Image: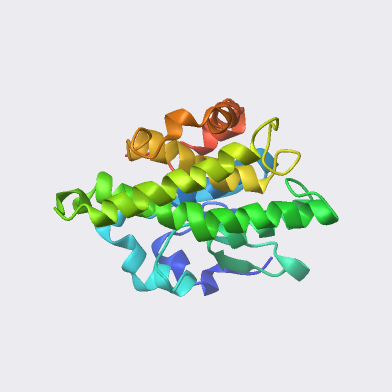
Amino acid sequence: MFDLTTFPIMRRWPPKDPSVIQLYSLPTPNGVKVSIALEELGLPYEVHRIDFGQSDQHTAEFLSLNPNGKIPAIIDPDGPGGKPLPLFESGAILLYLAEKTGKLMPAGAGRWEVIQWLMFQMGGIGPMFGQVGYFHHFAGKEIEDPRPRTRYFNEARRLLSVLDQRMAGRDWIAGDYSIADISICPWVRNLRDGYLAGKETGLAEMPNVLAWLDRFLARPAVERGLKIPARP
Protein backbone atom coordinates (compact mmCIF):
# COMPACT_ATOMS: atom_id res chain seq x y z
CA MET A 1 0.00 0.00 0.00
CA PHE A 2 1.15 3.50 -0.80
CA ASP A 3 2.58 5.38 2.17
CA LEU A 4 0.18 8.29 2.85
CA THR A 5 2.72 9.94 5.13
CA THR A 6 4.19 11.51 1.99
CA PHE A 7 1.18 13.87 2.05
CA PRO A 8 2.00 16.87 4.28
CA ILE A 9 -1.55 17.00 5.63
CA MET A 10 -0.92 13.70 7.43
CA ARG A 11 1.47 15.45 9.80
CA ARG A 12 -1.33 17.54 11.25
CA TRP A 13 -4.21 15.07 10.88
CA PRO A 14 -2.64 11.58 11.06
CA PRO A 15 -5.05 8.82 9.98
CA LYS A 16 -6.06 5.98 12.24
CA ASP A 17 -6.69 3.80 9.20
CA PRO A 18 -4.73 4.94 6.13
CA SER A 19 -6.39 2.25 3.99
CA VAL A 20 -9.71 4.15 3.83
CA ILE A 21 -10.76 7.46 2.29
CA GLN A 22 -9.64 10.43 4.37
CA LEU A 23 -12.25 13.21 4.53
CA TYR A 24 -11.38 16.74 5.66
CA SER A 25 -14.56 18.64 6.27
CA LEU A 26 -17.16 20.47 8.37
CA PRO A 27 -20.96 20.03 8.49
CA THR A 28 -21.62 22.93 6.09
CA PRO A 29 -23.79 22.60 2.95
CA ASN A 30 -20.72 21.82 0.86
CA GLY A 31 -19.13 19.61 3.47
CA VAL A 32 -22.13 17.37 4.08
CA LYS A 33 -22.51 16.69 0.37
CA VAL A 34 -19.49 14.41 0.60
CA SER A 35 -20.28 12.80 3.96
CA ILE A 36 -23.82 12.05 2.73
CA ALA A 37 -22.48 10.55 -0.50
CA LEU A 38 -20.00 8.40 1.42
CA GLU A 39 -22.77 7.20 3.72
CA GLU A 40 -25.10 6.47 0.79
CA LEU A 41 -22.37 4.55 -1.03
CA GLY A 42 -21.24 2.61 2.02
CA LEU A 43 -17.60 3.48 1.42
CA PRO A 44 -15.30 3.25 4.44
CA TYR A 45 -13.82 6.59 5.40
CA GLU A 46 -12.23 8.51 8.22
CA VAL A 47 -13.22 12.09 8.93
CA HIS A 48 -10.99 14.94 10.11
CA ARG A 49 -12.62 18.11 11.39
CA ILE A 50 -11.15 21.28 9.86
CA ASP A 51 -11.77 23.88 12.53
CA PHE A 52 -12.35 27.29 10.97
CA GLY A 53 -12.27 28.82 14.45
CA GLN A 54 -8.63 27.73 14.66
CA SER A 55 -7.95 28.72 11.02
CA ASP A 56 -7.13 25.12 10.15
CA GLN A 57 -8.02 25.85 6.54
CA HIS A 58 -5.14 28.31 6.28
CA THR A 59 -2.44 26.01 7.60
CA ALA A 60 0.34 24.89 5.30
CA GLU A 61 -0.72 21.29 5.79
CA PHE A 62 -4.29 21.86 4.65
CA LEU A 63 -3.26 24.16 1.81
CA SER A 64 -1.00 21.37 0.55
CA LEU A 65 -4.19 19.42 -0.15
CA ASN A 66 -6.42 22.30 -1.20
CA PRO A 67 -4.58 25.49 -2.17
CA ASN A 68 -7.94 27.29 -2.18
CA GLY A 69 -8.27 26.73 1.56
CA LYS A 70 -11.85 25.41 1.46
CA ILE A 71 -13.58 22.26 2.63
CA PRO A 72 -14.30 19.52 1.77
CA ALA A 73 -11.28 17.65 0.48
CA ILE A 74 -10.38 13.98 0.39
CA ILE A 75 -7.51 11.60 -0.15
CA ASP A 76 -8.51 8.23 -1.55
CA PRO A 77 -5.64 5.77 -0.96
CA ASP A 78 -7.14 3.51 -3.63
CA GLY A 79 -7.53 5.97 -6.49
CA PRO A 80 -7.25 5.33 -10.23
CA GLY A 81 -4.65 2.70 -10.97
CA GLY A 82 -4.43 1.87 -7.27
CA LYS A 83 -2.60 5.13 -6.53
CA PRO A 84 -3.71 7.68 -3.93
CA LEU A 85 -5.86 10.50 -5.26
CA PRO A 86 -6.05 13.86 -3.44
CA LEU A 87 -9.12 15.84 -4.47
CA PHE A 88 -10.87 19.06 -3.52
CA GLU A 89 -14.11 20.84 -4.60
CA SER A 90 -17.32 19.14 -3.50
CA GLY A 91 -18.70 18.76 -7.02
CA ALA A 92 -15.54 17.10 -8.26
CA ILE A 93 -15.54 14.76 -5.26
CA LEU A 94 -19.18 13.77 -5.87
CA LEU A 95 -18.42 13.00 -9.51
CA TYR A 96 -15.38 10.97 -8.53
CA LEU A 97 -17.21 8.92 -5.90
CA ALA A 98 -20.11 8.22 -8.26
CA GLU A 99 -17.79 7.07 -11.03
CA LYS A 100 -15.61 5.07 -8.63
CA THR A 101 -18.60 3.05 -7.42
CA GLY A 102 -20.91 3.14 -10.43
CA LYS A 103 -23.70 4.41 -8.18
CA LEU A 104 -25.72 7.62 -7.77
CA MET A 105 -25.08 8.38 -11.44
CA PRO A 106 -26.92 6.88 -14.43
CA ALA A 107 -25.30 5.92 -17.70
CA GLY A 108 -25.86 7.44 -21.12
CA ALA A 109 -27.80 10.66 -21.54
CA GLY A 110 -28.98 10.50 -17.92
CA ARG A 111 -25.41 11.07 -16.79
CA TRP A 112 -25.40 14.48 -18.41
CA GLU A 113 -28.78 15.31 -16.92
CA VAL A 114 -27.32 14.72 -13.48
CA ILE A 115 -24.20 16.71 -14.30
CA GLN A 116 -26.17 19.71 -15.55
CA TRP A 117 -28.08 19.96 -12.26
CA LEU A 118 -24.86 19.48 -10.33
CA MET A 119 -23.45 22.46 -12.24
CA PHE A 120 -26.66 24.40 -11.57
CA GLN A 121 -25.97 24.00 -7.87
CA MET A 122 -22.30 24.88 -8.09
CA GLY A 123 -22.76 27.90 -10.35
CA GLY A 124 -26.03 29.24 -8.99
CA ILE A 125 -27.52 27.75 -5.83
CA GLY A 126 -24.33 27.65 -3.77
CA PRO A 127 -22.96 31.13 -4.53
CA MET A 128 -26.33 32.90 -4.40
CA PHE A 129 -27.65 31.17 -1.30
CA GLY A 130 -24.31 31.83 0.37
CA GLN A 131 -24.73 35.54 -0.31
CA VAL A 132 -28.22 35.39 1.18
CA GLY A 133 -26.67 33.90 4.29
CA TYR A 134 -24.06 36.65 4.50
CA PHE A 135 -26.45 39.57 4.04
CA HIS A 136 -29.33 38.11 6.05
CA HIS A 137 -27.77 36.07 8.83
CA PHE A 138 -24.10 36.95 9.22
CA ALA A 139 -22.03 40.16 9.24
CA GLY A 140 -23.65 41.60 6.12
CA LYS A 141 -26.95 42.07 7.90
CA GLU A 142 -25.43 45.15 9.53
CA ILE A 143 -25.04 46.85 6.13
CA GLU A 144 -27.74 49.50 5.84
CA ASP A 145 -27.85 49.63 2.05
CA PRO A 146 -30.75 47.25 1.15
CA ARG A 147 -29.70 46.69 -2.45
CA PRO A 148 -27.31 43.73 -1.97
CA ARG A 149 -29.82 41.96 0.28
CA THR A 150 -32.67 42.55 -2.15
CA ARG A 151 -30.59 41.40 -5.10
CA TYR A 152 -29.67 38.07 -3.50
CA PHE A 153 -33.14 37.46 -2.07
CA ASN A 154 -34.61 37.93 -5.54
CA GLU A 155 -32.06 35.69 -7.20
CA ALA A 156 -32.55 32.97 -4.58
CA ARG A 157 -36.30 33.17 -5.15
CA ARG A 158 -35.77 32.83 -8.90
CA LEU A 159 -33.52 29.79 -8.47
CA LEU A 160 -36.02 28.17 -6.12
CA SER A 161 -38.78 28.73 -8.68
CA VAL A 162 -36.66 26.92 -11.27
CA LEU A 163 -36.33 24.01 -8.87
CA ASP A 164 -40.03 24.05 -7.99
CA GLN A 165 -41.03 23.82 -11.64
CA ARG A 166 -38.51 21.06 -12.21
CA MET A 167 -39.73 19.01 -9.24
CA ALA A 168 -43.41 19.05 -10.24
CA GLY A 169 -44.41 15.40 -10.51
CA ARG A 170 -40.91 14.15 -9.69
CA ASP A 171 -39.38 12.44 -6.68
CA TRP A 172 -35.79 13.31 -7.62
CA ILE A 173 -34.35 16.00 -9.81
CA ALA A 174 -32.79 13.86 -12.55
CA GLY A 175 -34.67 10.58 -12.59
CA ASP A 176 -33.44 8.30 -9.82
CA TYR A 177 -31.83 9.61 -6.65
CA SER A 178 -28.36 10.87 -7.54
CA ILE A 179 -25.48 13.15 -6.67
CA ALA A 180 -27.56 16.00 -8.11
CA ASP A 181 -30.02 15.68 -5.21
CA ILE A 182 -27.13 15.32 -2.75
CA SER A 183 -25.60 18.50 -4.14
CA ILE A 184 -28.69 20.73 -4.02
CA CYS A 185 -30.79 19.68 -1.04
CA PRO A 186 -28.26 20.56 1.70
CA TRP A 187 -28.24 24.12 0.39
CA VAL A 188 -32.04 24.34 0.43
CA ARG A 189 -32.06 22.98 3.97
CA ASN A 190 -29.46 25.50 5.06
CA LEU A 191 -31.32 28.40 3.46
CA ARG A 192 -34.32 27.52 5.61
CA ASP A 193 -32.81 26.14 8.81
CA GLY A 194 -29.36 27.73 8.92
CA TYR A 195 -29.78 31.14 7.34
CA LEU A 196 -33.44 31.40 8.44
CA ALA A 197 -34.27 32.98 5.09
CA GLY A 198 -37.07 30.75 3.85
CA LYS A 199 -39.70 33.48 4.13
CA GLU A 200 -37.58 36.16 2.48
CA THR A 201 -36.74 33.93 -0.49
CA GLY A 202 -40.22 32.49 -1.01
CA LEU A 203 -39.34 28.93 -0.04
CA ALA A 204 -42.69 28.48 1.70
CA GLU A 205 -44.34 29.11 -1.68
CA MET A 206 -42.43 26.22 -3.30
CA PRO A 207 -44.38 23.05 -2.35
CA ASN A 208 -42.53 20.80 -4.78
CA VAL A 209 -39.14 21.85 -3.40
CA LEU A 210 -40.31 21.38 0.19
CA ALA A 211 -41.68 17.89 -0.53
CA TRP A 212 -38.40 16.99 -2.25
CA LEU A 213 -36.41 18.27 0.72
CA ASP A 214 -38.55 16.20 3.11
CA ARG A 215 -37.89 13.05 1.05
CA PHE A 216 -34.20 13.79 1.09
CA LEU A 217 -33.99 14.45 4.83
CA ALA A 218 -35.90 11.23 5.60
CA ARG A 219 -33.12 9.06 4.13
CA PRO A 220 -31.08 7.35 6.89
CA ALA A 221 -27.77 8.02 5.12
CA VAL A 222 -28.67 11.70 4.89
CA GLU A 223 -29.50 11.83 8.60
CA ARG A 224 -26.08 10.38 9.37
CA GLY A 225 -24.16 12.46 6.86
CA LEU A 226 -25.59 15.75 8.07
CA LYS A 227 -23.89 15.18 11.45
CA ILE A 228 -20.42 14.46 10.05
CA PRO A 229 -18.03 15.59 11.32
CA ALA A 230 -19.68 15.93 14.69
CA ARG A 231 -19.93 19.38 16.16
CA PRO A 232 -17.81 19.90 19.30
| Left or right of residue 87: residue 79 | right
Closer-to-camera residue (82/105): 105
Quadrant location, the N terminus: bottom right
In terms of image quadrants, where is residue 177?
A: top right
Query: Is 171 above or below relative to 43?
Result: above
Closer-to-camera residue (15/92): 92
In terms of image quadrants, where is residue 118?
A: bottom right
Quadrant location, the C terminus: top left
- Can the viewer see residue 193 in this picture? yes
In terms of image quadrants, where is residue 208?
A: top right
Q: Measuring from the top left, give residue 156's x and y in whole percent.
A: 43, 47
Q: Measuring from the top left, give residue 92's x and y in whole percent.
A: 61, 62
Residue at (55, 32) in percent of width and height: 213
Closer-to-camera residue (151/132): 151
- Can the viewer see residue 230 in this picture? no
| Left or right of residue 117: residue 149 | left
Residue at (26, 45) in percent of width and height: 136
Q: Measuring from the top left, give residue 205's x and y in whole percent.
A: 46, 30
Residue at (42, 71) in percent of width and height: 68
Query: Is 105 above or below relative to 4?
Result: above
Q: Farthest residue toward the right?
A: 108
